[in-house]
Amino acid sequence: MLEKYEAVIGLEVHAQLLTETKLFCSCSTKFGAPPNTNVCPVCLGHPGALPVLNKKAVEYAVLMGLAVNCRINKRSVFARKNYFYPDLPKGYQISQFDEPLCEFGFVEIDSGKEKRKIRIKRIHIEEDAGKLIHDRGGDSLVDLNRSGTPLIEIVSEPDIRTPQEASEYLKTLRKIVTYLEICDGNMEEGSLRCDANISVRLKGSTDLGTRTEIKNMNSFRNVEKALQFEIERQVEILEEGGKVEQETLLWDADNYEARSMRGKEESHDYRYFPEPDLLPLQITDEWITEIKNKMPELPNAKKERFQKDYSLPEYDAEILTSEKPLADYFEKAAEVTTDFKAVSNWVMSEVLKVCNRDKISIEEFPVPPENLGKLVGLISKGTISGKIAKDVFEEMLSTRQTPEEIVKAKNLAQISDSSAIEKAVEKIIADFPAQVEQFKNGKEKVLGFLVGQVMRETKGKANPQMVNKILIEKLRQ
Ligand code: ADP
Ligand code: MG
Ligand code: ZN
């Protein structure tokens, strides 16, 4: 981007709530059911069918509001957002408009360089539409299983300044909803979706420029790419003396470009009006307190606690708390040993390496955390060397045995018995007279070779510090 411009970005993020049933009926929200089986008169939009609000969805939305420092409005109102869409047979979506459930919050994002506050304008509850399927031999099909699934929409103020910050903000929200266990955060499957509003202006200006809205970005990378593309396009228009048109663009991830989808609708185009089939939503202080008490530890708090309680560097704490199940895994492993940094190293390197290689989540990782903790304990106690530990770990992956069982069965315990080590040292001194001579003539580098030979003689099980010490003693005799 040209130096004299800055971007102004606001995100609208939709998160699908993990309730068992839909927002206004008792149909299941289960993903992957045969098409049009999780439906009823309410979510099919039959005339006269009446919506009944799902309490769990409200609870989840309030939880999110509290987690991102919002004011929870004790009265909020559902509204009809009218439009024609073939995947929403009612012809309107039940949403919230001028009286949303949550307002005036913020999250802190860490762009690596600095911490920034991004204000949240509002969070409201709404229902999802069904799904259109276009790629079936020329016909278009509709699956209404998703119709009526509960969503929250989290709308930011236009406080985001760069594509990287936008993706950081989205990552922060994803972490929070998954920690709260109110959304699975899966962007590819569309459980977490993001539309971006974007304008550019001259640096130093406080006016907002004309914005466009980009839809359909289903990964963090796409969000960054799409915003970068759009910033450059808008700057180019302004540089040529033109005007940015307010419109809605669709991101085409295959061709790396945003294409015009439609002129941007204004809110009055939707003819919002209060939903006559639902009373205003009233929430008591007692219920809000009850929900507050269910608040789990949030990502930032957990990260700080990991740095403090386990004396971990910020880098480790950041990685270990990047996902709650990973943090849980670390904490369970750290219960059985006091060498926390070593546990952290094992989790960050060996454990995550296997998860990436085998494309499994930490929840599917075959070694129970207690066993990893025990393995680290065996190294700290000197029972096995770090090198042998790698072999034991491999064995743990395939056999599900505890490290103690493997060490015992394979006779892998480190030899710390000096007479056994002395015997091996003597054998090597006898076998390599030339190298011994070199050492005695001052070529100390050859010591490494001799240590290596002793380790080989003991199949890697000798305590390396002891081998070093005894070898030097014998050579100096
Ligand atoms: P709408 O009702 O059209 O959806 P909102 O006022 O709710 O508009 O804003 C939608 C999103 O667009 C918010 O995230 C907001 O921060 C952002 N936004 C509003 N104006 C601008 C602008 N000029 N440039 C960039 N983002 C903007
Ligand atoms: Mg909007
Ligand atoms: Zn239904």
Image: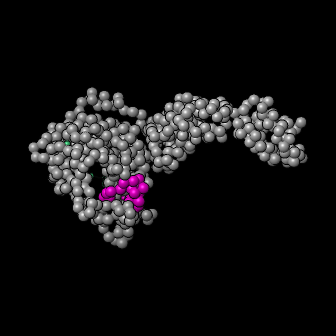
Q: Is residue 403 above or below residue 456?
A: above
- Tell me where residue 463 sits by quadrant: top right
| Residue 213 drawn at (x, y percent) | 30, 58
- Residue at the spot 65% in from the left edge and 39% down from the top edge: 388
Task: Return the x and y of residue 9 as percentages of the image width and height.
Answer: 36, 55
Does the magenta run of residues contain 336?
Answer: no
Q: Nearer the viewer, residue 399 or 67?
A: 399
Do we see residue 333 in this rendering?
Answer: no
Q: Position of residue 24 (x, y in %)?
A: 20, 40
Query: Residue furthest toward the front?
Result: 409
Q: Residue at x 50, y 38 (%)?
A: 366
On screen, 226 above or below 24? below
Over which residues does the magenta segment extend? Answer: 204-230
Task: Judge whether residue 207 is colored magenta.
Answer: yes
Instruction: Give residue 235's position: percent from left, percent from top.
Output: 38, 66
Which image quarter is the C terminus in?
A: top right
